[in-house]
Amino acid sequence: MDGAIPNPEVFTHVRVIIGIILGLSVSRLLTGIARIIQHPQRRNIYPVHLGWVLFTLLTVVHFWWFEFYLHQLVLWKFEAYLFVIFFASMHFLACAMLFPDSMEGYTGYEDYFMSRRGWFFGIVISIFILDFIDTAMKGMNHLRSLGPEYPLRNLVLIGLLGAGIYLSNQRAQLALLLAALIIQTAFILVQFDTI
């Protein structure tokens, strides 16, 4: 509707929906970790898998934190609302890929993760691509405030995750994980320590 009057309560509604989806995401990860702690012998623990669980938890919490900047959108349109729900939902899918409902047919988390890594990395790549759109929605001033390290971080992570789809070597997978954790942690500490 052209000429619509901005309503600040709309952002509160959007935050609630984001909170529900991201709450489910964090719950999925924490429940999976709790199952491993409760029954470590039942599932062959795989350190690379646990590292991606940490990366994904960090990414979800970071997303929840920086989505506060959506309050700068003066007029919410349905397309923006759908986009934000879709963006949050991709985080849930990444979490669900790390902890499936059943491990039947897999010898443990290494077998599961390596067989499903294409899906997991593909979903996380889409998260960082969608992040460019989300950041643009917040305005050019916000985009400029993130500096050149913002697009560099996204592009490097997209490249690393893309490599992860094709690399089956355990050392290569560990190296990708460590690089991704360092890049994501450094970016968060530099850019988003305060709202």
Image: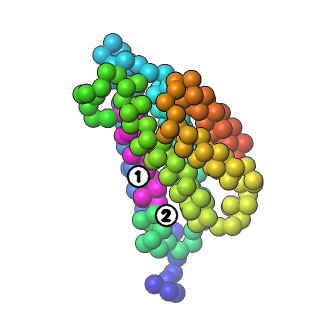
Q: In which quarter of the image is the N terminus?
A: bottom left
Q: Is residue 110 left or right of residue 76?
A: left
Residue that appears at 37% across and 43% down: 24
Residue 154 vs 27, above or below: the answer is: below
Residue 167 vs 190, above or below: the answer is: above
Any part of residue 19 in sight: no
Helix, strand or loop at disc 2? helix
Dot label at residue 11: 2
Identified by mark 2, the residue type is: Phe
The rendered magenta stretch, by its main secondary structure, is classed as: helix
Q: In this view, does 94 lie to the left or right of 103?
A: right
Kindly identify which residue carries mark 1.
89
How many numbered marks does the figure carry?
2
Residue 69 vs 192, above or below: the answer is: below
Identified by mark 1, the residue type is: Ser
Report if residue 95 lies within the magenta region.
yes
Residue that appears at 52% across and 48% down: 125
Tell me which label, 2 or 1, sits earlier in the chain. 2
